[in-house]
Image (cartoon, helix red, strand yellow):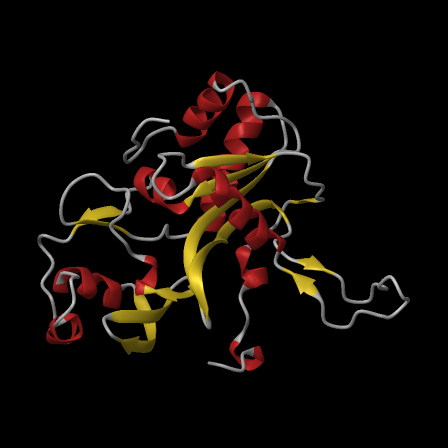
Amino acid sequence: MPELGPGDDLAGLMIDAASAQGTPIEEGDILVVTQKVVSKVEGKVMSYEGVEASQLAITITEGHRRDPRHTEMILRESVRIVRMDRGVIIAETKHGFYCANAGIDASNIPGNNTIALLPDDSDASSQRIRAAVKDRLGVNVAVIVSDTFGRPWRNGAANVAIGVAGLDPLLDYVGALDAHGNVLHTTQIAAADELAAAAELVTGKALGIPVTIIRNYPFETVEDASIQRLLRTGERDLFR
């Protein structure tokens, strides 16, 4: 796919690229779309040239490679700072995500002093892509918008879902029986996260591949799917 910008037809370009590769989008496919390309077409890429860094942003950034204006945008996109240390900011975003630097970064973006913010509503982004594919091809698909998050207590980042459409992001085994007849009381699997992580094996981080097709994964269509199903509330979170 080409480099995309504000207002570009993401769904149309996805459809064309899939067909050109000999793998046209089919009924029941899951389309995993990277956050960065969604942010590009939705106008969430910006220059921080005109941003005035606060004293807090300047202090946080001292001794680290990030520009204080970049740090200022991280603070503006955060509703709560969870932890700050060694130049890293773990923040709660306005979307309810807990991630490094409020999900803002400068990778895979053309230009200097340019950063990408998270989409305003990745569920809505997913729904628009799903609807466009249905309208143009007449097939039902599921869509996941993915991003790369670090993980507490483990090295290495992994891709997770930050928006979904068409499938339940949570696979619920509560009440089911295991192979030995035991009732499962708490087991819930973040299926959308697992699918997003698998898709990253195709997209990589520097290959210029923003969309993955996952085929033959069985799922039930859910019209009102939301990433909120994966976000743990404060009263259930032991670490908040």
- Image position of 148 (left or right of 73): right
Residue 2 to residue 80: above or below: above
Determine if residue 96 is in view.
no
Q: Position of residue 203 (x, y in %)?
A: 44, 39
Q: Residue at x 51, y 78 (%)?
A: 234
Q: Position of residue 12 (x, y in %)?
A: 44, 25
Q: Nearer the viewer, residue 90 or 135?
A: 90
- Image position of 222 (left or right of 48): right
Q: Quadrant of the N terminus?
A: top left
- Image position of 83 (left or right of 178): left
Q: Position of residue 218 (x, y in %)?
A: 72, 41
Q: Quadrant of residue 188?
A: bottom right
Determine if residue 39 is in view.
yes
Task: Name the outermost residue toward the right.
Answer: 181
Q: Residue at x 41, y 25 (%)?
A: 13
Q: Quadrant of residue 165?
A: top right
Q: Position of residue 71 (x, y in %)?
A: 20, 65
Task: Name the outermost residue toward the front.
Answer: 155
Residue 100 to residue 222: above or below: below
The number of callouts visible is: 0
Q: Residue at x 8, y 54 (%)?
A: 50
Residue 18 to residue 130: above or below: above
Q: Quadrant of residue 65?
A: bottom left
- Image position of 110 (left or right of 192): left
